[in-house]
Image (cartoon, coloured by chain):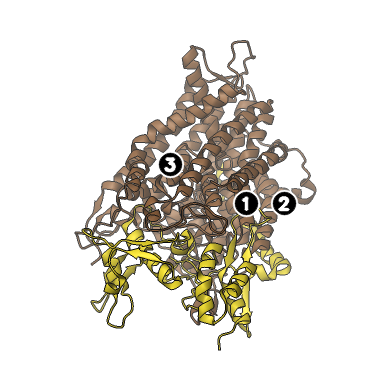
Amino acid sequence: MWEQILPGLRIKIFMTIVLGVVYPLAMTGISQLIFPKQANGSLITQNGKVIGSEIIGQSFTKPEYFHPRPSSAGSGYDPTASSGSNLGPTSAKLVRGTTKTDDKKNEVVDYDGISLRVVHFCLENGIPYESSVPLDRFKNATGDLDDVKLIKAFNDDKAPLVFTPKASIPADAVTASSSGLDPHISPASAQIQAARVAKARGISVDQANQLVARFTDNPDLGLLGEPRVNVLKLNLALDQQFPRK
Amino acid sequence: MTSIGILQIAIFLGIILACTKPLGAHMVKVFEGQRTFLHPVLRWLEVLTYKVTGIKEDVEQRWTHYTAALLSFSIFGFLLTYLLQRAQGYLPFNPQNFGTPNMPPDLAFNTATSFVTNTNWQAYSGEATMSYFVQMAALAVQNFASAAAGIAVAVALIRGFARQEKKTIGNFWADVTRATVYVLLPISIVGGLLYVSQGAIQNLKPYTEVTTVEGAKQVIAQGPVASQEAIKQLGTNGGGFFNANSSHPFENPTPLSNLLAMFLIFVIPAALTYTFGKMVGDTRQGWAIFAAFSVMFLIGVFVCYHFEQAGNPILANRGLQTAATSGQSGGNMEGKEVRFGIANSALFATVTTDASCGAVNSMHDSYTPIGGLVPLFNMMTGEVIFGGVGAGLYGILLYCILAVFIAGLMVGRTPEYLGKKIEQKEVKMAMLAVIATAFSILVFAALSSVITFPAKGYWNPQGAAIANLNNSGPHGFGEILYAYTSSTGNNGSAFAGLTVNTPWYDLTLGLAQLIGRFLFLIPLLAAAGSLVMKKKVPETAGTFPTHGPLFVGLLVGTVLIVGALTFFPALSLGPIVEHYLMQSGKLFSMLLPTLGIWS
């Protein structure tokens, strides 16, 4: 019996050394030698400081930048908590959003939901829409739209708010990615955002669109995957070519 | 569906087809102990392994000894994986200082069973709980070990058919060593470097703190990813370095690395069909199985692709584009990455659940009901569509036994397969394996759907176990069903919304993994032990040929019918009813906890 069992222990320890230590360390050494940039995370440095990774998305909220997709990684684009929303197609939370009461007993947004994202995407980018209730009714004292009120209106069972864009919204622009770190947006989403970015920077829409076209990656080998725009690289190019004063 | 999407699926299957014969022939040489082109470079490592471990490569084993060796290999694998996780705070390569509290006993148990059984279920979140050393020396090693064990069992079963009037089915230790040295390791080295070239990371540095363009802080997780990624796919393991698995840009940076991942998942299971044909002396037998695999694969991938592209009508009503255009992929993009779009996400989901891989490049929990039913059903077949490394082949051979048995019943003849009479013992063993896995999936899923827990208990927070769900309604039931199906099938993919890191789910899912692995493997090894002693009966005019289209049809039918009959009631309560509710625009809110669970 022992002759069948003891080799199990010995081979396990041997494998741990060869495959668990030597193999990954050798691979690390070779990778650092041949592909140092990729092996260390394709980091981008500006003025001596690391400002991000080429292939990891980061948040952009200002109007003069192209915006990435919604993210479910931590509180948004947190690479220590990669995750999708894991909400299914019939989830009310996904479609209409949810609110919650915080420590100070204020009602705040718990999950924004796709309906609210559609509203913001339309307003930010000047997409025409129809709304069953004028959006002015959802403004707070400072004149901004109140997300909590909107989410409650979408969740109203008797007379829910119906908000219909008059142009199709690219699906990727208002849905969360799988990793929560998606560095890309679709070219369609970038083209829609170009007008807003151009206005905020005082440049022509053509200039913004030319930059989008330059930063649109075609499918790998002309065939694999989808055309896509790397948000961070595009925004860095914007800052370089059309700096804001 | 777009023509370029369909073309990508065709190209993928074409590449797999092209590699089946060369790799299959290589594995014949490896497992028959012949010299291969890799011997000049790697034979020393094989010899060194035998020397260090005291294994005699020429001593053959009966099925009982072969099984004992497999169990010993698995038990020590379990123990070491468990201990390394619990001791991670005292071990090197731990720049983030993760300690024992990050891996409590139930989570460490679940992860250890999961990596021993080739499930690689992630109840843990890699970047937030595990040191680089545990990833390398515990998890990645088990990626090699459980894959090699799977190949060994498949080869042993092949020998059961190929030999006659013998008692032994090979040497487990030699099979495992050869599978590792001549197949898994060399492909992993090449695959790992290709991964790095695409942007997968490979370093031992602490996480990088950056200040983003807009001035926010971002902490970028690092680690030895590529070396693990290669064997994770090649060994059809699937446990990700990061929580988001193969959708994380550091694990799967480009569509090209995505193709590499899917290639690595399918290449060994496909090649084993040729190895099988060659070793039993009739390559047509192997190609028949390859054909059955391909038919079932193509059905699954096109159903999944169609429904994911059709998208969610509830969201289309709110203005989202579902048709693909040149500037965006349309469809159901929730939980999918832009670079993969709909086609490569649906293809990957089908590949990873056809095989017992379980890596994901998109979140299956957010799939449309029928799009998500495809991965679920793939796993319910027992993952016999190409299948896991080794596991796919021994799984489909089980269905071959059942198929010839059913055909034999229909024409009233003693069933034969490859000249061996299929008798009571073989059919009993095959049925035992089928019933054990169905039992594990359905009973555990039913239990978790109804069980409730008292206050301050150890197992789960107070209240119903379904409070751990992330979705309610039929989709919530789908999350539970998927979890036990994935664990029993040793897949490891998930409807990941379910909070599984509680003692109740960690332990029941761990048990499901053990049942799915060992109550499947051991009956098959017993069948191999009985088959190897039989004489081959000569082929006559009355022999049912098992290499033609008729047999392929019968085999596909057997797989689908056994799967459909066993699981149709459960599926109709989950994804099927959800599909119709989604079409009618029905939404489900999480029920408010009535027992104060969160207080």
Mark 1: secondary structure = helix
Residue under mark 3: which chain is it in?
A: B
Judging depth in this view, the residue of A106 and B243 nearest the camera is A106
Q: Earlier in the sequence, mark 2 or mark 1?
A: 2
Query: Residue at coordinates 62% horizontally, 72% vertically from top-left?
Result: A211
The verdict on a common chain for dots 2 and 1 is yes
Name the residue tied to disc 1: B259
Query: Residue at coordinates 35% horizontally, 64% vertically from top-left?
Result: A130
The verdict on a common chain for dots 3 and 2 is yes
The residue positioned farthest toward the bottom in the image shown: A245
Left or right of B345? Residue B571 is: left
Task: Tell me the CA gap for discs 1 and 3.
Answer: 32 Å
Mark 3: secondary structure = helix
Q: Which mark is residue B45?
A: 2
Which chain is represented by brown in the image? Answer: B
Mark 2: secondary structure = helix
Q: Residues within 10 Å of mark 1 (few under 14, many from 20)?
A: many
What amino acid type is highlighted by mark number 1?
Leu
Task: Tell me the CA gap for discs 3 and 2.
Answer: 34 Å
Q: Is residue A38 visible in this depiction of the protein?
A: yes
Q: Earlier in the sequence, mark 1 or mark 3?
A: 1
Residue B211 vertical placement versus A11 (above, below): below
What amino acid type is highlighted by mark number 3?
Ile
Q: Residues within 10 Å of mark 3 (few under 14, many from 20)?
A: many
The residue positioned farthest toward the left in the image shown: B594
Q: Position of residue B268 (x, y in %)?
A: 63, 43
Q: Residues within 10 Å of mark 2 (few under 14, many from 20)?
A: some
Q: Earlier in the sequence, mark 3 or mark 2?
A: 2
Specify the colour of chain A: yellow
- Quarter of the C terminus of chain B within the rendering: bottom left
